[in-house]
């Protein structure tokens, strides 16, 4: 009897403890404070824009086939020159007021001189080249990818999202501001690369070098990267404007197994192919460790207060839930890529004939490196996990890019971006984020305090697949909103006198 009541008392105490613990978790979730800035509505004067005119200008830009296929097959000079002439004709006011330099043969650097030399410049970036349309798929497009068809409220074609809309919207914003008689207080630089899709080394890299050589150091650079996504962060009912504050690094590692071959009628236990296949399998099975820090930690902290209650409880109490949250995120390829250096086996070559045991096998593994890891860490990881002296490996020449540093969110530049998003896209939740791909933005890290990666357009999941895919298009209203965004951001960030 006495024993039974002791058990009962212990169970009661445990229940009270559990309730108390649950209470702590719930209170944590309930008291999470939103980080979203409160803003005034967009000035009415900035609402009137000629959507049809903007669509026509983007359409014309899309018709220039500035296709970057590979380092050996960059965008044709004639197309890039035609695009430059097109921009000059489409935005005469900007071209009258701003200085234009051609850098790295085809990239463009515009300077809109500020009135206050003591203020540091800001850089707005975009790129003029586009990826090719996969051969044989042109006919599957609703409208031919390089016709720039305007129909059904959309501009259709390759580059309408990536990244010619941004190119056109930035110039359109400047053009209208020049007409309005605006002179910025700080100098505004427009940096338009011509080879982003094939490394950016002849374009953005050269522009950044030019600026560095002139001693220019900007307050911030704003490039493409993330966007406003709807129905992607499923636990947040509102659209989420993900503003990239960091991007992942990149390294492709070539592995080679060498094992004496021979005749397939008397096979040894192992050969180059099996040795390498097992090593590759080990690499795939044991990725680098996941962790929630840096840009992704910031992302979760900014979206959590805007979430439905259930997921908010988990994110409000990361001191106990971190392992669970990590596991949940790792399930999704996209979210998983935001918390670890990813491993993707992309090439495998071995063998010449069905009855010859291969003596050599090669494979390539592509790693996207999480900020905080380095490409040296990746190589050490490959050595440890493959752990076989019959295998040699080396990073591919020119493939190695370290992850970016994480730009700040507690500075005026980021606050202005957040405020501008909320003004132009009311009801949108802003969150700093990690960009999983590579952008030209990485080159500007050496000439700007902070680099932000954000395209001011709204994308649904089906739009995201159009980028580099079939039927790329942008809604005219989206394009108009982009112009409003750049105009408002410039007016606030660059100031005027
Ligand atoms: Zn792009």
Image (cartoon, helix red, strand yellow):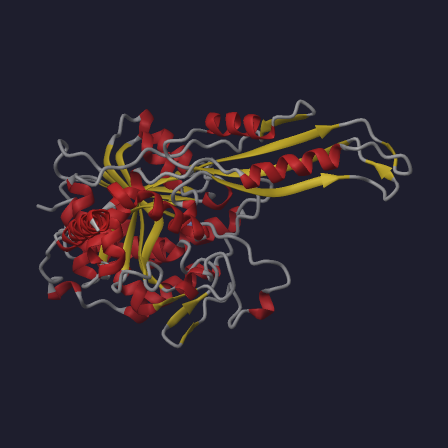
* Spot occupied by residue 190 in the image (x, y as percentages of width and height): 30, 44
> Looking at the picture, does residue 397 appear above or below residue 63?
above
* Spot occupied by residue 7 in the image (x, y as percentages of width and height): 23, 48
> Looking at the picture, does residue 74 appear above or below residue 464?
above
Q: From the viewer's perspective, is 433 left or right of 341?
A: left
Residue 91 in view in this figure: no
* Spot occupied by residue 93 in the image (x, y as percentages of width and height): 25, 54
Q: Residue furthest bottom?
A: 152
User: Which residue sits at x=43%, y=29%?
Assistant: 374
For the C terminus, give its image quadrant: top left
User: Which residue sits at x=58%, y=31%?
Assistant: 396
Which is nearer the eye, 302 or 441? 302
User: Which residue sits at x=27%, y=37%?
Assistant: 407
Give residue 214's quadrant in the image: top left
Give residue 175's quadrant in the image: bottom left
Which is nearer the eye, 475 or 251? 251
Q: From the viewer's perspective, is 294 left or right of 264?
A: left
Give residue 312's quadrant in the image: bottom left
> Looking at the picture, does residue 369 appear above or below residue 27?
above
> Looking at the picture, does residue 171 appear above or below residue 352?
below
Which is nearer the eye, 44 or 289? 289
Residue 227 in view in this figure: yes
* Spot occupied by residue 457 in the image (x, y as percentages of width and height): 31, 60
Q: From the viewer's perspective, is 83 left or right of 256?
A: left
Q: Residue furthest top?
A: 389
Q: Residue furthest front?
A: 1
> Total label count?
0
User: Which residue sits at x=43%, y=45%?
Assistant: 437
């Amino acid at each position: 009897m006495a024993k039974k009541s002791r058990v009962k008392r212990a169970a009661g105490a445990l229940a009270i403890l559990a309730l108390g613990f649950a209470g702590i978790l719930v209170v944590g979730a309930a008291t999470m404070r939103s980080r979203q800035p409160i803003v005034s509505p967009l000035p009415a004067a900035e609402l009137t824009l000629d959507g049809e005119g903007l669509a026509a200008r983007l359409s014309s830009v899309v018709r220039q086939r500035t296709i970057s296929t590979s380092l050996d097959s960059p965008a044709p000079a004639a197309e890039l020159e035609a695009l430059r002439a097109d921009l000059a004709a489409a935005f005469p006011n900007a071209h009258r007021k701003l200085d234009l330099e051609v850098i790295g043969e085809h990239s463009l650097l515009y300077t809109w001189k500020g009135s206050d030399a003591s203020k540091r410049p800001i850089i707005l970036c975009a790129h003029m080249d586009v990826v090719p349309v996969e051969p044989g798929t042109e006919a599957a497009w609703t409208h031919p990818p390089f016709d720039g068809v305007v129909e059904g409220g959309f501009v259709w074609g390759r580059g309408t999202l990536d990244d010619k809309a941004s190119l056109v919207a930035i110039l359109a914003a400047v053009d209208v501001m020049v007409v309005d008689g605006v002179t910025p207080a700080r100098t505004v630089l427009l940096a338009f690369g011509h080879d982003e899709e094939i490394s950016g080394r002849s374009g953005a890299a050269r522009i950044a070098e030019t600026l560095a050589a002139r001693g220019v150091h900007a307050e911030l650079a704003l490039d493409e990267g993330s966007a406003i996504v709807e129905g992607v962060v499923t636990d947040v009912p509102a659209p989420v404007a993900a503003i990239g504050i960091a991007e992942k690094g990149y390294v492709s590692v070539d592995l080679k197994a060498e094992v004496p071959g021979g005749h397939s009628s008397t096979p040894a236990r192992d050969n180059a192919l099996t040795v390498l296949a097992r090593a590759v399998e080990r690499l795939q099975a044991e990725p680098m460790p996941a962790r929630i820090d840096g840009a992704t930690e910031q992302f979760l902290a900014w979206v959590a207060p805007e979430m439905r209650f259930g997921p908010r409880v988990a994110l409000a109490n990361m001191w106990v839930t971190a392992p669970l949250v990590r596991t949940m995120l790792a399930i999704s390829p996209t979210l998983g890529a935001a918390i670890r250096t990813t491993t993707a086996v992309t090439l495998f070559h071995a063998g010449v004939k069905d009855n010859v045991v291969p003596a050599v096998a090669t494979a390539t593994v592509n790693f996207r490196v999480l900020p905080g890891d380095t490409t040296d860490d990746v190589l050490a990881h490959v050595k440890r996990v493959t752990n076989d002296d019959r295998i040699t490996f080396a990073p591919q020449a020119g493939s190695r890019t370290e992850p970016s540093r994480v730009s700040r969110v507690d500075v005026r530049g980021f606050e202005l971006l957040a405020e501008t998003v909320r003004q132009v896209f009311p009801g949108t939740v802003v969150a700093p984020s990690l960009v999983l791909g590579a952008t030209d933005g990485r080159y500007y890290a050496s000439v700007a305090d902070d680099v932000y990666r954000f395209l001011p357009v709204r994308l649904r999941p089906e739009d995201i697949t159009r980028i580099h895919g079939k039927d790329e298009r942008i809604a005219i209203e989206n394009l108009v909103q982009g112009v409003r965004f750049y105009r408002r951001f410039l007016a606030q960030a660059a100031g005027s006198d």
